[in-house]
Each structure stands twice: as structure tokens, then as C-alpha cells.
Image (cartoon, rainbow, N blue to C red):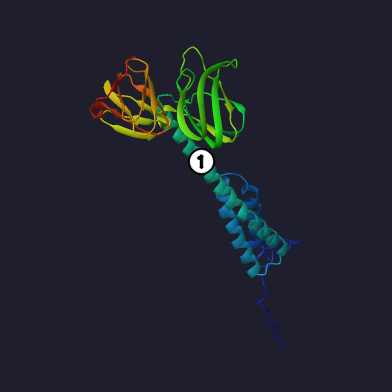
Amino acid sequence: MTNTVDDSRPDHSDVEPGSTALPTGSGVAVAALALGLAAIVFAPIPFISFIALFVALAGVITGIIAAARRSRRKTLWVVGLVLSLVALPIAVGVSFASVYVTSTVFTRLSAGIENGFARGLFGNAPVSVSVHGAGNDTISIAPADGAGSYGVARITADGPGRITIVALDQNGVESELLLDEEGPYTGTVLFNLFTDVEVKQFRIEAKGTWTVETLPVAELSALEGGETFEGVGDDVLFYEGPRASASFEATRGDAWLWTTLSTADFDCETDPGEVCVFEIADDGAFIQVYSTGSWTLRVGPAATGGSIVARG
């Protein structure tokens, strides 16, 4: 009888004595575990989470492959697969948050730089500030364009009843009567008009709700030569251009105009049908209008002759 050798059995001659050969799929199971561990560690870290996202995807795929091959190292690929599945949504969320925060920071930084260059005040860009309240109160306030400048306040009072606002200096002493009108009221007014007194607070007496917003000059309605501006109620305008003539007319209700930084500080009160004529210096002017109705302001060639000539 002839003995034959069965060569179909696997050759383990390269396996050292005492060692055990890895079963099929063991390498894939180890890879799944390694990828899962890496993904769960780096997923919560901003920006690195982008890499962790792909690592988690690779861990999920590797874990599925290990399961398909029925790896005997089941514990390894199951743990790796679970870690990758947990890391995946964390990496997605952190990545989106990183993009959002970065975008917001750059947007605000860009806006601040543009505003700073436009105003020539880089690092101290003026911004609007709103204060909301109800009834009587005293609020801190400051011109949006910085200490020593004229202040502009947009005021809204809801409901009936009188609203009175008095400007106070740093010692709480009254410096200006800003507003004393029946509500409801919406208008824009100047404050901090006197160079020897700095307005620090507004004392508000009202029966309903109100809003006080300080505005930078850049947000005012701008006047140019040859332009006609029509408005209603109290408003503040700013003219910056060459020396020009101007005319002011109350078209409905009575109106009062006051201007500064012109050839002379003056005021002019008109009734419907009356026109006030004045000149604006080439260094510009703030123009405050108080009116119970509508009015028209013309500058430069658009200005018309009138029955009242304003003198400083």
C-alpha cells in the first residue's frame, strides 16, 4: 500500500511554536477598532473634526466588512463600529459649528473694519444702541460717535399719555429738555448740544412703553445741494457740502427748524404757507426739525425765496 500526503491542509510552518495564527478577518477587525478609537477621540475637536468625519466613515465601512467576513474577533469590530457610529454625528455637528463660528467672526470683523475705515476711526467704530423700557426710568446714554460730539436719538413712545425726556450731566443735573410731547410719538432729536456739558443720562417720564436709540451721524438722512427733502414730524438731517442757501417750509401744521455748524446758529419758526430762508456754511450743518405735521427742506438751487429770512 502506498501512503500519500494530503497537501490541501494549510501550511503553518512559518508560525512560531506556541503562537496562534489569526483567523480570517482579524486584521480588518483590528483596523475597525483603531479607526473607531481615533474617530471618537478627534471628533469633538474643532476643525480636526473634519478629518475625524472621514475616519469615522472609514471605521463604519471597515466594521461592516469585518462583519461580512464573519471575523472571529467579533468584539473588536463591534466596538470599532459602535465608536465610529457615535463619532460620526459628533464630527458632523462640530464641523458645522466650526464653520458657523468662523463665518460669523469674519463677517463681524469685516463689518467693523469697513465701518472703521469709512469713519476714519478704526478700532472705535460707532454703533447704534437701543434701550427699551416702560414708565418712568433713568437710563445711561452717550453719543454714538463718541464723547464731545453731537448726539442723535430716535425715540418711540407707544400708547397715549405725555412722554418727557430730560438730559442729565454726569452729576445728575438737568442740562437739556429733549422731549415733551403727547403720545404716541416717533421722532429723531439732537442732544449733547452744549460743549461745556456732557450728557450722561436721560430721565424719562412716560405712561407706556418706549424705545430710545442713539444713532451715529452716518445713519442720518444726508442732504446735498440742489436736493429737496420732504419729511413728517421731528427729524434730524445732516448737510456736508459747499456753502449753500436753503429754504424751509411747513406744508401742514406748524414747524420749527434749528441748525448749527452753519454761518450762524439760528432757529426759524414757520406756519403753513411761510418759508424760512437761511444759509449753510461749507463746513456742514446739523438741521433739527420739530413739526406737528409735514414739511419741506430745499438746499442749493432748489431753495426758494420766502417770507421769513432767518438771521443768526
Q: Residues within 10 Å of mark 1 (few under 14, many from 20)?
A: few
- For residue 138, above or below residue 185: above
**Residue at the extreme right:** 18
**Residue at the extreme bottom:** 1
**Residue at the extreme top:** 196
Q: Is residue 121 shown to the viewer in this render?
A: yes
- For residue 64, above or below residue 272: below
Of residues 106 and 87, the one nearer the viewer is: 106
98 sits left or right of 233 in the view:
right
Tell me where residue 23 sits by quadrant: bottom right
Q: Position of residue 297 (x, y in %)?
A: 32, 29
Of residues 83 and 65, the one nearer the viewer is: 83
Of residues 260 and 291, the one nearer the viewer is: 291
Q: Position of residue 283 (x, y in %)?
A: 32, 19
Q: Is residue 73 shown to the viewer in this render?
A: no
Q: Residue at x 53, y 45 (%)?
A: 100
Q: Which element is circle 1 on?
A: helix
The amino acid type found where label 1 is placed reads Thr
Tell me where residue 62 sits by quadrant: bottom right
Q: Residue at x 55, y 27 (%)?
A: 164
Q: Position of residue 71 (x, y in %)?
A: 68, 67
Q: Position of residue 6 (x, y in %)?
A: 67, 79
**Number of numbered tags placed on the structure image:** 1
Q: Quadrant of the C terminus?
A: top left
Of residues 202 and 254, the one nearer the viewer is: 254
Q: Residue at x 27, y 22 (%)?
A: 244
Judging by the rendered image, the residue that carries numbered circle 1 is 104
Q: Quadrant of the N terminus?
A: bottom right
